[in-house]
Image: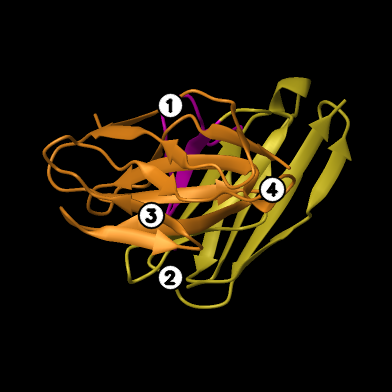
Chain colours: A yellow, B orange
């Protein structure tokens, strides 16, 4: 398995500002992902974080709005830029291990006012 | 593309009742299948998984069998507890693709 930590665990932000979420995993993993979970909804994949290169974004998500970094095999960041109330969600980091199982971090609960 | 369909909730059961949450999938190839659970205010936890046809995943009294002929992976538990109240997500993954999730089923167990 993998133990994943995220910082911050929650935040309240003003519209127009940006927030960077950090994800740290306790072991080297093959793949890292970022998901969004809007209130009462299922999970939507934002992007796959690629080590040393640009992230791969899903339809409807763009790098200018959600820049992602992955400098090494155990760390990634997601920035939510120029926030609006519609960005209020839980943002979840996820990793895939060599056993091809995905594990999830505890999430970052974001409220944009 | 790949997709997962699970039964709509919410599901409300009395303690010690039998639980079934239906899940069917559409996928090319031979996906791995998963059930995740999300307790209130928490992230997702892997509950069980199955990687090939006829495999049975089990954990904490929950079971699910990978049925290729019916493309299903129904979650069952013989006797639910109040502590099982949570949202349950069925998901699949084909090869190196990220998980594809169902919409989730909220379970409430009352004493």
Distance from label 3 to label 2 (Cα)?
28 Å
Q: Earlier in the sequence, mark 3 or mark 1?
A: 1
Residues marked 3 and 2, same chain:
no
Distance from label 4 to label 3 (Cα)?
18 Å
* Region in magenta: A42-65
Secondary element at image label 1: loop
Q: Earlier in the sequence, mark 4 or mark 1?
A: 1
Residue B74 counted in the magenta span: no
Residue located at (27% from left, 34% from top): B25
Classify mark 2: residues with Cα within 10 Å, few (<14), some (14-19) or many (20+): some
Residue B12 left/right relative to B75: right
Q: Chain of mark 3?
A: B
Residue B68 left/right relative to B85: left
Residue B5 left/right relative to B10: left
Closer mark to the observer between disc 3 and disc 2 = 3
Residue B73 left/right relative to B87: left
The residue identified by callout 2 is: A29
Classify mark 4: residues with Cα within 10 Å, few (<14), some (14-19) or many (20+): some
The residue identified by callout 3 is: B63
Closer mark to the observer between disc 3 and disc 1 = 3
């Amino acid at each position: 398995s993998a133990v994943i930590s995220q910082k911050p665990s929650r935040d309240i932000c003003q519209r127009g500002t940006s927030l960077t979420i950090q994800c740290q995993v306790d072991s080297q993993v093959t793949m890292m992902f970022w998901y969004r979970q809007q209130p009462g909804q299922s999970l939507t994949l934002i992007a796959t974080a690629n080590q040393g290169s640009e992230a791969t974004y899903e339809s409807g998500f763009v790098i200018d709005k959600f820049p992602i970094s992955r400098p090494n095999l155990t760390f990634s960041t997601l920035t939510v830029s120029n926030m609006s109330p519609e960005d209020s969600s839980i943002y979840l980091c996820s990793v895939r291990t060599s056993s091809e199982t995905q594990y999830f971090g505890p999430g970052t609960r974001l409220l944009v006012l | 593309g790949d997709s997962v369909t699970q039964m709509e909730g919410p599901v409300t059961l009395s303690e010690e009742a039998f639980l079934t949450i239906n899940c069917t999938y559409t996928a090319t190839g031979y996906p791995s299948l998963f059930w995740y659970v999300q307790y209130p205010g928490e992230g997702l936890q892997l509950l069980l998984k199955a990687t090939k046809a006829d495999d049975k995943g089990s954990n904490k009294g929950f079971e699910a069998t990978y049925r290729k002929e019916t493309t299903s992976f129904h979650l069952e538990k013989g006797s639910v507890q109040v502590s099982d109240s949570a949202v349950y997500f069925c998901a699949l993954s084909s090869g190196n693709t990220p998980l594809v999730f169902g919409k989730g089923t909220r379970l409430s167990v009352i004493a």
